[in-house]
Image (cartoon, helix red, strand yellow):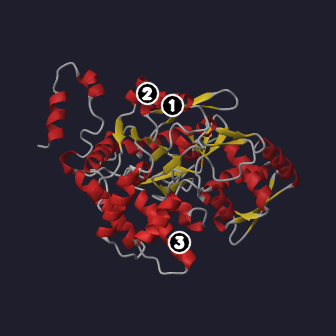
Amino acid sequence: MAYDDRLADSVEGVDGNEELFSRFRHKKLGVTRSGQEVVEAPFPAAPTALEGLGVGTSLIHKLILKHLLISGALRTDELAARLAIPVSLLEEPTAFLRKEMMVEARGEGSAGISGLLRLNLSERGYQRARVYMEENTYAGPVPVPLEQYRRQIAAQTVRQQVASRRRVDEVFRHIVINPDNKTQLGAAFNSGGSIFLYGPPGTGKTFLASQLVHLLHGDVAIPHAVEVQGQIIRVFDPVNHEPVETAQAAGIGTEVDRNMQGADDARWVRCKRPVIVAGGELSLEMLDLEYHPNIGFYEAPLQMKANGGIFLIDDLGRQVAPTSAVLNRWIVPLENEVDYLSLHTGAKFQIPFDILPMFATNLDPESIADEAFLRRLGYKIHVGYVTPEEYHSIFQQYCEANGLAYSPDMVDELIEKFYRTSGRHLVACHPRDLINKVIDFSIYEGVRPSINMDMMKKAWNAYFVLED
């Protein structure tokens, strides 16, 4: 019997205290019990009826009219593709719009919806579509309702991700990292909570944080948009989300989709788990819904786009907004794993806060956060200067990456004559930056790049601010 099985059984066996102990129980106990792998969440299935879309028919009618206003005449399969729904679900709404004399249709192929129709707006439909465009200009896939979004985020939660020592060793096998830092990162990842990386500039905090993405497994479903109380929030962002190509959704909107048993819901995009990084440019407005009055709908905040993945706030303490305000914005989400957003109407609603939040800073932690907030940060990991041995290893890696000969004796001389005489620390980013400058000078002088002390002196003097 595995350790977590024994502990789980002992907790569950305490008479009368099951509910109390369930609050104390580690969230990951039993996730991989009996050697079983974590089961990947199923992708949302294509709805087979209008009710399965979860939004009102009036919203579907508006989207149909707006798509026709923008694109002109469309076949029903083309329209269905734009709405990201099976073409069979268009029969009822298009029949209603035809009855209301807002849409005109003519058959292509055999009669009826099964033979595809070419739709275009009537004069009445054109005027109505203009009114709807003034309400909001959203003309994309049918949004998913908030409750469907919540259920899917819960099903594909990042908080159930587990990394073994073997997996962490594999991810970091080509990376020079302090063994203690590697162990701390693995345990922090398994906590499912927040991670705070701190230490001097250039020690690799951001780089190490970015490597945790390789510990994530499975894809996630990201909705094109979410509907909340009649308002539309755009979520899928091609800048921050990386789609995974599949053949599943290819049939949506075509004739072959009329029996869509088991097909994916094309209102969602299958993506790699997101990793979103925000640095000094981060403002409080980026953490709330962004309403565009001129277009009438919302852009999701960064933490909503990061759901199911990692959200790194880099250079903490150097944001546009006051650091205390940025940190206070995270207190409720970190404690309760939910976030609250507000519509421009004043209405508030709850969304999942399903991310691995990470913070990185090169400032003194106690100068930017009080004890109460630091307590809420699950793992505080100090990333310090490298040892001479680690510096050698990093230098060798960058030499090999650039096809340059690596000389241990030359690096020893560099450390002795430049670092020790100047009192500078060995920093993980220095080999990369110095070698890059050697190459810059070599290109300028028209010579083959090579690592020698003459070139290294030029690189050193151009890299550091020298005292007079």
Identify the amino acid type marked 1: Leu
Q: Position of residue 209 (x, y in %)?
A: 41, 49
Q: Position of residue 233 (x, y in %)?
A: 63, 42
Residue at position x 61%, y 54% in the image: 89
Where disc 3 sits, the SS reads helix
Residue at position x 86%, y 49% in the image: 127
Q: Identify residue for label 2.
A: 373
Where disc 1 sits, the SS reads helix
Q: Residues within 10 Å of mark 3 (few under 14, many from 20)?
A: some
Query: Is 418 displayed left or right of 271 in the figure?
Result: left
Q: CA distance from mark 3 to mark 1?
A: 43 Å
Q: Note whether 233 is above or below 164 in the view shown.
A: above
Q: Disc 3 vs disc 1: Cβ atoms closer than 8 Å?
A: no
Q: Disc 1 vs disc 2: Cβ atoms closer than 8 Å?
A: yes
Query: Is 427 displayed left or right of 353 in the figure?
Result: left
Q: Residues within 10 Å of mark 1 (few under 14, many from 20)?
A: some
Q: Identify residue for label 1.
A: 327
Identify the amino acid type marked 3: Phe
Q: Residues within 10 Å of mark 2 (few under 14, many from 20)?
A: some
Where disc 2 sits, the SS reads helix
Q: Nearer the viewer, residue 170 or 305?
A: 170
Identify the amino acid type marked 2: Phe
Q: Position of residue 237 (x, y in %)?
A: 59, 52
Q: Is residue 216 visible?
A: no
Q: Nearer the viewer, mark 2 or mark 3?
A: 3
Query: Is 299 displayed left or right of 67 in the figure?
Result: left
Residue at position x 24%, y 46% in the image: 32
Q: CA distance from mark 2 to mark 3?
A: 47 Å
Q: Identify residue for label 3.
A: 441
Q: Nearer the viewer, mark 3 or mark 1?
A: 3
